[in-house]
Image (cartoon, grey):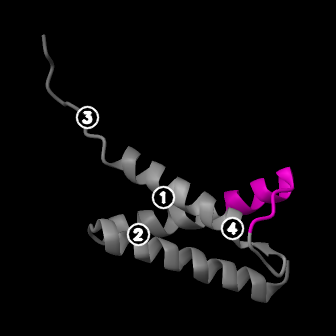
């Protein structure tokens, strides 16, 4: 991968995280969580696509379809896991 493709991938991943934050809402730290999760999912999606040989909507050397799918899956999973509340009271 070349530097322009890496910068484009980072820009698209950050855009996905920002759009997800716009839809779901939250504060500054929630935005940082979504941006990080989006970059992680984008990267994992690309590597899974390369590893398995799945090509869905290629954009140069970037497998944009798998990257987008990975980003969306990780964003939804991370958002769901971050909203789980722990009970702090003992039931005894």
Q: What label does residue 75 carry, if any?
A: 1
For label 2, the crowd category at 10 Å Cα-Cα, with few meaning under 14, some 14 to 19 and many 20 or more, is: some
Up the image or down, 4 lies above or below 56; here it is: below
Work out whether mark 1 precedes mark 3 in sequence or the reverse, and give the earlier one.
1
Structural distance between the alpha carbons of marks 2 and 4? 17 Å
Question: Helix, strand or loop at disc 2?
Answer: helix
Q: Are marks 1 and 4 in contact (CB under 8 Å)?
A: no
Structural distance between the alpha carbons of marks 1 and 4? 15 Å
x 53%, y 60%: residue:
72
Magenta-drawn stretch contains 51: yes
Q: Is residue 29 visible?
A: no
Q: What label does residue 86 carry, if any?
A: 3
Work out whether mark 3 precedes mark 2 in sequence or the reverse, and give the earlier one.
2
Q: Kindly report which numbered mark, 4 or 3, lies closer to the viewer in this rendering.
A: 4
x 83%, y 82%: residue:
60
Structural distance between the alpha carbons of marks 3 and 2? 24 Å
Residue underneath mark 2: 20
The residue lying furthest to the top in this view is 92
x then y, percent, for residue 47: 77, 58
For label 3, the crowd category at 10 Å Cα-Cα, with few meaning under 14, some 14 to 19 and many 20 or more, is: few
Front position in the image: 36 or 79: 79
x then y, percent, for residue 63: 76, 70
Q: What label does residue 65 carry, if any?
A: 4
Question: Helix, strand or loop at disc 1?
Answer: helix
x then y, percent, for residue 61: 84, 77
Q: Kindly report which numbered mark, 2 or 4, lies closer to the viewer in this rendering.
A: 4
Work out whether mark 2 precedes mark 4 in sequence or the reverse, and give the earlier one.
2
């Amino acid at each position: 991968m070349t530097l322009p493709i890496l910068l484009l991938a980072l820009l698209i991943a950050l855009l996905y995280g920002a759009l997800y934050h716009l839809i779901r809402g939250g504060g500054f730290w929630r935005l940082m969580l979504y941006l990080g999760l989006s970059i992680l999912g984008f990267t994992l999606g690309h590597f899974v696509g390369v590893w398995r040989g799945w090509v869905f909507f290629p954009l140069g050397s970037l497998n944009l379809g798998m990257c987008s799918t990975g980003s969306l899956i990780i964003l939804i999973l991370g958002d769901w896991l971050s909203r789980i509340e722990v009970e702090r009271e003992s039931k005894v």
